[in-house]
Image: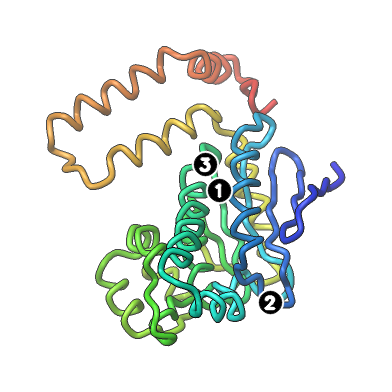
């Protein structure tokens, strides 16, 4: 299928074989956030989340970097603004991350170059993250006298409090191997293998039931922070699988398995 581009100023959108790739498209600024990108990205993600033909969403960056965080000129303007204006901008960033994290579609971060500040937040908010061995990461906000506040819930969920304490407080950059060790990313591959590995992962995602995937994401969100031995958790998970097994997608998946054919969603 030929790539299809949508009409965005700071994004490029490609559709290919059930996968929508959202390219951050400010390469001259290392895809740093500005007002326009903060408006366009959640709008784009929300639309893709409603399209049945989209089985996976890949977030990627044009040029040399994935995303360098906030645009410094934009930050200069915000430093001169009052509290209310800063609050509105912060809410836009928080909403963008929430829209990404809550998409019912599987989301994948394709990381190369730098992923700093808000860029690292995008990586953490995706379901899956694959990085080039040359990628680097960091919550560098403290070096500017700022805090990684809006990205904190997603980074904390990805790397845990112990690692977050170090990197939030020091602002150190770290490489892809360290990102893998602390749990921010799932795989590290050579730069020239990144797209091939991504294609294999998308194929794996397309083989799964889309309703089951969306249900998994809701289930994980509902279980976050709960004790596995809590009787309410046992009841909640029992209801979850009963609901799924009674659905048409599960019937189709089981029937396809026994008939030794592909289910309808991957045919």
Q: Is residue 186 visible?
A: no
Which percent across, then down, holds residue 78? 52, 74
Q: Is residue 259 above or below residue 66?
A: above
Q: What residue would you read off at disc 2?
A: 29
Q: Residue at the location (48% across, 33% down)? A: 214
Mark 2 touching mark 3, by CB under 8 A?
Answer: no
Q: Residue at the location (66% across, 75% down)? A: 30
Q: Could you say which disc has been placed on residue 184 in the image?
A: none
Q: What residue would you read off at disc 1?
A: 107
Nearer to us: label 2 or label 3: 2
Which percent across, then down, holds residue 135? 57, 76
Q: Is residue 102 visible?
A: yes
Q: Quadrant of the C terminus?
A: top right
242 and 13: which is toward the camera: 13
Q: CA distance from mark 2 to mark 1?
A: 24 Å
Q: CA distance from mark 2 to mark 3?
A: 27 Å
User: Residue 131's quadrant in the figure?
Assistant: bottom right
Q: Could you say which disc has been placed on residue 103 in the image?
A: 3
Dot 2 alpha-carbon crowd within 10 angstroms: few under 14, some 14 to 19, many 20 or more: some
Which percent across, then down, holds residue 262? 64, 24
Is disc 1 placed on a helix, strand or loop?
Answer: strand
Nearer to us: label 1 or label 3: 3
118 and 81: which is toward the camera: 81
Q: CA distance from mark 1 to mark 3?
A: 8 Å
Q: Quadrant of the N terminus?
A: top right
Which percent across, then down, holds residue 198? 64, 55
Mark 2 vs 3, N-terminal side: 2
263 and 87: which is toward the camera: 87
Mark 1 touching mark 3, by CB under 8 A?
Answer: yes
Q: Residue at the location (79% across, 47% down)? A: 6
Mark 2 vs 1, N-terminal side: 2
Q: Is residue 237 above or below residue 22?
A: above
């Amino acid at each position: 299928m030929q790539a299809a581009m949508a009409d965005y100023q700071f994004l490029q959108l490609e559709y290919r074989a059930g996968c929508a790739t959202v390219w951050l498209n400010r390469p001259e600024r290392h895809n740093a956030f500005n007002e326009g990108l903060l408006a366009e990205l959640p709008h784009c993600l929300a639309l893709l989340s409603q399209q049945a033909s989209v089985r996976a969403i890949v977030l990627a960056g044009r040029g040399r970097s994935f995303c360098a965080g906030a645009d410094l000129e934009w930050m200069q303007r915000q430093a001169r603004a009052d509290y209310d204006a800063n609050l509105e901008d912060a809410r836009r960033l928080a909403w963008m991350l929430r829209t990404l994290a809550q998409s019912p579609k599987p989301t994948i971060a394709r990381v190369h170059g730098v992923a700093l500040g808000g860029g690292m937040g995008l990586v953490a908010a995706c379901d899956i993250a694959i990085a080039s061995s040359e990628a680097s990461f960091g919550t560098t906000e403290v070096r500017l006298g700022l805090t990684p506040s809006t990205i904190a819930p997603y980074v904390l969920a990805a790397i845990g409090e112990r690692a977050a304490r170090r990197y939030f407080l020091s602002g150190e950059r770290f490489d892809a191997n360290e990102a893998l060790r602390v749990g921010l990313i799932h795989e590290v591959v050579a730069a020239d293998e990144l797209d091939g590995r991504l294609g294999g992962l998308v194929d794996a995602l397309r083989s799964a039931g889309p309703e089951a995937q969306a249900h998994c994401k809701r289930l994980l969100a509902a279980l976050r922070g709960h004790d596995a031995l809590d009787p309410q958790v046992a009841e909640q998970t029992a209801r979850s699988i009963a609901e799924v097994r009674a659905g048409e997608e599960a019937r189709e998946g089981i029937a396809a398995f026994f008939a030794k054919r592909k289910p309808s969603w991957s045919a």
